[in-house]
Image (tube, rainbow, N blue to C red):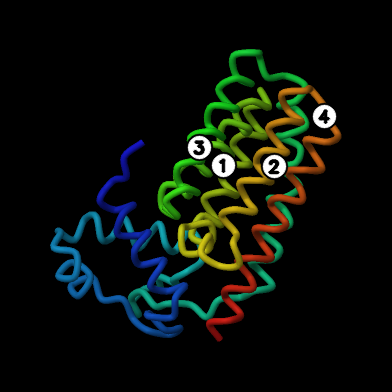
Amino acid sequence: MPQTIAENIAQQLAEQILSGELAPGERLEEKRVTEQFGVSRTPVRDALRQLAATGLVAIKPHRGVTVIDLDVEQLSDMFEAQAEVEALCAKLSARRMSNIERRQLQMTGQKSEPALATTDHELYTNTNEEFHKMIYSGSHNDTLEQVAINLWNRVAPFRRSIFFKLGNRMERSFVEHEGIIAAIVAGEEDSAQRAMYEHVTNSSVNAIDYLLRQN
């Protein structure tokens, strides 16, 4: 699905925050951001609200928007919750996915192969999101799917392309995806659950390692 202007701005600002280009405590003035991206204030306000929802900035009355000092412990907590939720999604997908859904999951995994061949981190990031959300849907539990999506949105800035550039994470993630897919297609519930838990945990370790290196 194509990004909106606000989503694109939020993504770029998130990467500037995570890379240290925008420092903790720095104010994000609406006027400056509109000039930077050449847009009106409406998408900028939407983008800043999206960033606030992920915990990267704080919006306070009469004080504007400021970049927060990232709390690694809080991020670790969110990833821990996500690992448990996604692991359950994978387990239920192994039990409930139709044959068509299993084949679609395999095809989604194959779509990320060109990203490895060309070292296209952005392409891999997009197919990675598609892969995970197919497994949320494949659980056939609407409540669980919504919880998984909400957690995904909270940690989304920490699963952008910038994090796949560290420690061969893209290549290792691809191998982990293959293991998850194989378990789900074979209907091996426990294996799918374990593989997904380890995958999200590895992603969290990679993200936290990156952040600590910036400090």
> Taking 58 as reference, is 103 left or right?
right
Please state which of residues 136 and 53 is positioned toward the viewer in this rendering.
136
Residue under label 3: 130
Identify the disc placed on residue 86.
2
Q: Is residue 106 above or below residue 215?
A: above
Q: Position of residue 172 (x, y in %)?
A: 64, 54
To which quarter of the image does residue 32 belong?
A: bottom left
* Mark 1: secondary structure: helix
Do the numbered discs 2 and 3 sit on residues whose CB atoms are within 8 Å?
Answer: no
Q: Nearer the viewer, mark 2 or mark 3?
A: 3
Q: Amino acid at mark 3?
A: Glu
Q: Residue at x 72, y 30 (%)?
A: 182
Mark 4 vs mark 2, CA separation in Å: 13 Å
Q: Is residue 186 above or below residue 120?
A: above
Q: Position of residue 2 (x, y in %)?
A: 31, 39
Count residues near mark 4 (Cα–Cα under 10 Å), then give few for <14, some for 14-19, many for 20+: many
Residue under label 4: 189
Residue under label 1: 149
For marks 2 and 3, the one nearer the N-term is 2
> Taking 199 as reference, is 130 left or right?
left
Quarter of the image containing the C terminus? bottom right
Q: Is residue 77 above or below residue 174?
A: below
* Mark 3: secondary structure: helix
Q: Amino acid at mark 2?
A: Glu
Mark 2 vs mark 3, CA separation in Å: 14 Å
Q: Amino acid at mark 1?
A: Ile
For marks 3 and 4, the one nearer the N-term is 3
Count residues near mark 1 (Cα–Cα under 10 Å), then give few for <14, some for 14-19, many for 20+: some
For marks 3 and 1, the one nearer the N-term is 3
Q: Residue at x 26, y 76 (%)?
A: 29
Mark 3 vs mark 4, CA separation in Å: 21 Å
